[in-house]
Amino acid sequence: MKSTESTSSAQVLKKAQPEEFDLVILGGGTGSTIAAWTFAGEGKRVAVVDRKYIGGSCPNIACLPSKNIIHSAKVVDYFRRSKEFGIILDGFAIDMAGVRERKRRMVRGLNNMYMENYRKTGAEFILGTGRFVAPRTVEVTLADGATRQLRGANVIVSTGTRAALETIPGLVEARPLTHIEALELDEVPEHLLVVGGGYVGVEMSQTMRRFGSKVTVIDRNGRLMSREDPDVCEALRSLLADEGIDILLNARIQEASGKSGDSVSVVVEQNGMEKVLKGSHVLVATGRNPNTEGLGLELTGVELTDRGYIKVNERLQTTASGVWAIGEVAGSPQFTHISIDDFRVVHANLTGGSRVTTGRQVPYCLFTDPELARIGLSETEAESQGIAYRLFKVPMETNLRAQTLSETRGFVKALVEADSDRILGFTAFGVGAGETLAAVQIAMIAGLPYTALRDAVLTHPTLVEGVIGLFSSAGSARNFVETTGAQISAA
């Protein structure tokens, strides 16, 4: 009997020992997914834990699904403009279930591709809820209630962010849409109230309007995409207004009632006056909160910032030895391409190199139609920093490829350092803006003067060819007092 008890105790002790890995990754976003494949491909034993999504939010509920549905809305726009292209239609109808299914097919294909990459590289993907139970040790609760303990020589936290819901009376009870639910609609909302005039709010407003919704945008700021230059903000406002979208600026939701998807009302305060807006659905797009609650970080020595993000240094090391954080949960700019670069930083620092996040370029693209894309300094940023620059700006209608596409709305502009030919920043609001931006960004990476693009031989007719015309235009000099940013001359 004594021997049996001893054996049983030994088995329990053995079972309680964590499984050992070279790298444990908590959260399966794009940066951490590529990290898993890369480290595993280099012979490391790697495990990735995610509670719901293969590949994280980007291929499942965010970047790619939203662009899929945005493109369906672009096709709708082509149908509406068919006469402009010499095509006569007797009418058409929107099948939102079909729009959703096209998106779902893409997501299923991406999930299969991701799992195949896991199989090829040897990294292990674990679907479950993970939390720290000790330094560098993660306990995973699986769907069937079973648990596993994983201990890594290093651990990467990449749990991302979630849509923020403000503490507005009645808002939670109204069950508002976030971007996740908006991308799963199987019907066109009769009247969509969009709270927030940032990335998600602007993109989804135009998309749903094109599908046939009446749309009202409510934003607390005085401009849509308020951090951009005034000419950019006005161009976006004009775009949405021209498509029949109602826009309320300097407006705040005071309370909400009803149920989104049925009937919902919001009380809005604007310029000291209150009004009641009624709609069928409400979409909240007012920012993001980090996913750090319930992770057991207090057991590891990982500290948080005052905003709840994981505190990291320029090498993306946390305050706990052997624990790293990447992506949005680490307070990095909220773009998938930055999450991927975060992985590169960590990979370099774990394989004998030295790489930091300091000073890196952060390009972005807003996928409205037309697109808005920017890299480097905006005029507003240059002025606030007292940086003198030459401004080059031309309308999209000067781009001959845009003329062939009947897509001439918008403009492109660039900032060039006043006392040199160095490109400081580039903004495009126009068709194919994201692709055109890449050409300018590569020139900036290479340290090329703007004259290299001005004098380049680029294929005709292409959208990127427009940078020749841009940098051939006369640049107006703008000088600013360094301490105040005030303009003192312009020629």
Image (tube, helix red, strand yellow):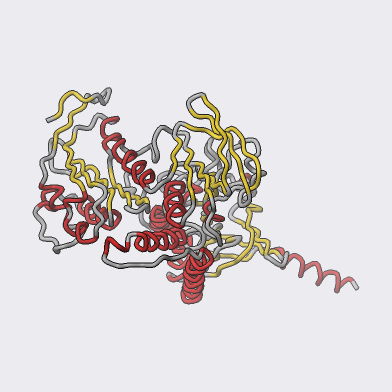
* Screen quadrant of the C terminus: top left
Closer to the camera in the image, 257 or 479: 257
Q: Is residue 68 above or below residue 259?
A: below
Residue at 61 percent across and 65 percent down: it is 127
Quadrant placement of the N terminus: bottom right
Q: Is residue 381 above or below residue 241?
A: above
Q: Which residue is at the front of the view, 445 or 247?
A: 247
Q: Quadrant of residue 50?
A: bottom right
Does 103 sit above or below residue 242? below
Q: Position of residue 270 (x, y in %)?
A: 49, 29
The residue located at (35%, 50%) in the rendering is 364
Say which residue appears at 55% left-offset and 38% top-offset.
277
Left or right: 37 in relation to 359: right
How many numbered marks are there?
0
Residue 58 in percent (x, y) is at 47, 59
Can residue 369 be seen at all in this image of the molecule? Answer: yes
Query: Is residue 153 at all visible to an observer of this figure?
Result: no
- Residue 457 is left or right of residue 198, and the answer is left
In this view, the residue farthest toward the front is 90
Side of 86 where 145 appears, left or right: right
The foreground one among 198 and 295 is 198
Q: Nearer the viewer, residue 418 or 49?
A: 418
| Residue 39 screen position, x and y as percent | 45, 66
Residue at image x 55%, y 59%? 185
Q: Quick one: which residue is furthest to the left in this view?
A: 455
Give the image location of residue 354, x and y in percent.
36, 52
